[in-house]
């Protein structure tokens, strides 16, 4: 299994507020991608919430629990972060993967996307939680007076209150890669064709190519925002996880 993490600060940003956390074992993997809205503590929020998401998903897997228990664990983690990040927001997704069966469960809120990449354009498995996407899905034209509709989130991590993410299952074919992409990457770079050096937003992508080889992780990043979690070091759900 090979993973490549690419992440860079946007030209209009003071800090790179993207982060990814991953835990892999026995040809299973849990990956959490977080894109925090820039603030004085957004870098901290991104890394702490990414780690908490992995903790929640791995513990649910170990207990052979349903995705409902992941939501319960996320709520628990949210209470630990709430006072420190009361006014902050972040997009995130969590993928629990069975690499032998090529099956996964996706939990997401915001505009981070998971895609399947073959020889051509990625096929995205989820739709961003934005005002623009909401109107597009309902086949209704987005009102022109709504400025920046593609960046207004309708669902996300919110410090003030817990927002329930969306859950879905998916499969993929042998020989393709999975892409975990923040909106700076999938929207500004891939969709709009802006070169990496000219991107205004933070842009990050994790590419996973499943195979029988041991886990290899390569990174090209301008921040310490790749977090590898040891499954044996994770606390119980009732202990301090953050």
Image (cartoon, grey):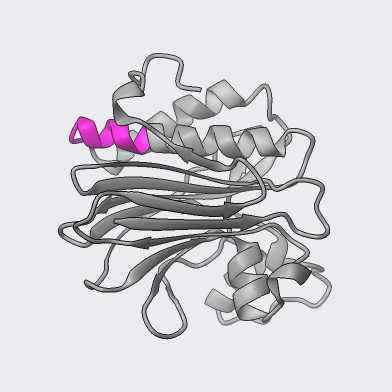
The residue segment tinted magenta is 56-65
- Give me the residue at 26% from left, 73% from top: 175
Classify 242 as above or below 55. above
Quadrant containing the N terminus in the rendered view = bottom left
Question: Observer-nearest residue: 119 or 138?
Answer: 119
Q: Is residue 91 left or right of residue 228?
A: right
Location of residue 71 in the rendering, given as x and y in whole percent from the top left corner: 39, 37
Q: Is residue 55 found inside the magenta-colored segment of the image?
A: no
Classify 170 as above or below 19. below
Location of residue 82 in the rendering, given as x and y in whole percent from the top left corner: 62, 26
Location of residue 212 in the rendering, given as x and y in whole percent from the top left corner: 19, 57
- Give me the residue at 65% from left, 33% from top: 44
Location of residue 34 in the rendering, given as x and y in whole percent from the top left corner: 56, 47
Which corner quadrant of the image does residue 72 belong to? top left
Q: Is residue 5 left or right of residue 101?
A: right
Classify 238 as above or below 55. above
Which corner quadrant of the image does residue 153 belong to? bottom right
């Amino acid at each position: 299994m090979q993973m490549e993490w690419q992440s860079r600060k946007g030209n209009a940003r003071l800090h790179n507020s993207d982060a990814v956390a991953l835990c892999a074992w026995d040809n299973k993997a849990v990956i959490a991608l977080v894109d925090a809205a820039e603030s004085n503590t957004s870098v901290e929020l991104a890394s702490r919430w990414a780690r908490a998401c992995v903790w929640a998903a791995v513990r649910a897997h170990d207990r052979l629990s349903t995705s409902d228990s992941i939501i319960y664990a996320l709520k628990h983690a949210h209470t630990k972060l709430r006072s420190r990040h009361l006014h902050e927001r972040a997009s995130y997704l969590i993928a629990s993967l069975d690499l032998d069966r090529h099956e996964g469960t996706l939990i997401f809120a915001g505009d981070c996307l998971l895609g399947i990449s073959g020889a051509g354009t990625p096929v995205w498995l989820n739709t961003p939680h934005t005002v623009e996407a909401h109107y597009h899905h309902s086949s209704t034209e987005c009102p022109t007076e709504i400025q920046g509709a593609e960046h207004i989130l309708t669902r996300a991590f919110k410090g003030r209150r817990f927002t329930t993410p969306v859950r879905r299952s998916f499969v993929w074919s042998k020989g393709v890669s999975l892409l975990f992409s923040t909106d700076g990457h999938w929207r500004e770079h891939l969709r709009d064709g802006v070169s990496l050096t000219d991107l205004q937003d933070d842009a990050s992508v994790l590419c996973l190519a499943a195979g029988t080889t041991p886990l290899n992780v390569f990174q090209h990043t301008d921040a310490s925002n790749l977090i590898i979690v040891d499954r044996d070091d994770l606390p119980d759900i009732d202990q301090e996880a953050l």
